[in-house]
Image: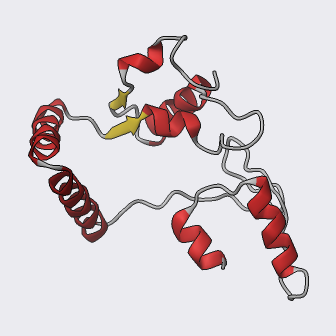
Amino acid sequence: ILAALQARQSCVSETSATQLRAAFEQSIHSVATVTVDSDGVCSACGVALSARAMDATQRQHARDTIQEAAAAAGDVAFLDLNAFAEWVQPRGYKYVIDGPNVAYRCQNGGGGSFSFYQIDLAIKALRRASDEQSVLLILPARYAVSSYVPNR
């Protein structure tokens, strides 16, 4: 259960956490809700989590998968993706952030909402970790209009 969850989710809803706790009640393992502070330290065990960079094979697999998805979506999507790649490459961005996905990360529970704060944290963390390398934020214009952004 945990391996499948880890492969698909970066955060767990309260409902899922309750189901996991129930599933592990009879096992030798324990399940707890924990927090990770801004330095990446787990509140339960005190261990600092480390970021893991993708190796060349993983990066190529990601590129291939994205290209395949764009091709499956049709010629326009495929051409748009390639045009974007050609625009980004000479500009030297080290990271590209998908703003809405970062803003909504782990926000699917009660009280969750679009969070500009999370976007800001992600950008600052990437800049700190990469000696101030360039970060490109992709945020569709409609997300900058307060009347549009859901759960804001």
The picture places residue 52, in percent across and down from the top left corner, at 47, 61
The residue shown at (20%, 62%) is 64
Residue 115 image-quadrant placement: top right
> Would residue 36 appear left or right of 66 to someone viewing this image?
right
Farthest-out residue, right: 25
The residue shown at (90%, 87%) is 26
The residue shown at (16%, 35%) is 84
The picture places residue 148, in percent across and down from the top left corner, at 51, 17
The picture places residue 109, in percent across and down from the top left corner, at 73, 43
> Would residue 49 appear left or right of 82 to someone viewing this image?
right
Q: Is residue 128 visible?
A: no
Residue 22 image-quadrant placement: bottom right
How many numbered marks have been drawn onto this rendered protein structure? 0
User: In the image, is residue 51 above or below residue 124?
Assistant: below
The residue shown at (25%, 70%) is 57
Q: Nearer the viewer, residue 63 or 134?
A: 63
- Which of the colour schemes (rainbow, by chain, secondary structure, one colour) is used? secondary structure
Q: Nearer the viewer, residue 40 or 96?
A: 96
Q: Is residue 29 visible?
A: yes
User: In the image, is residue 84 above or below residue 4?
Assistant: above
Quadrant location, the N terminus: bottom right
Q: Nearer the viewer, residue 21 or 62?
A: 21
The picture places residue 131, in percent across and down from the top left corner, at 41, 36
Q: Nearer the viewer, residue 129 or 11?
A: 11
Quadrant location, the C terminus: top right
Residue 42 image-quadrant placement: bottom right
User: In the image, is residue 142 above or below residue 101?
Assistant: above
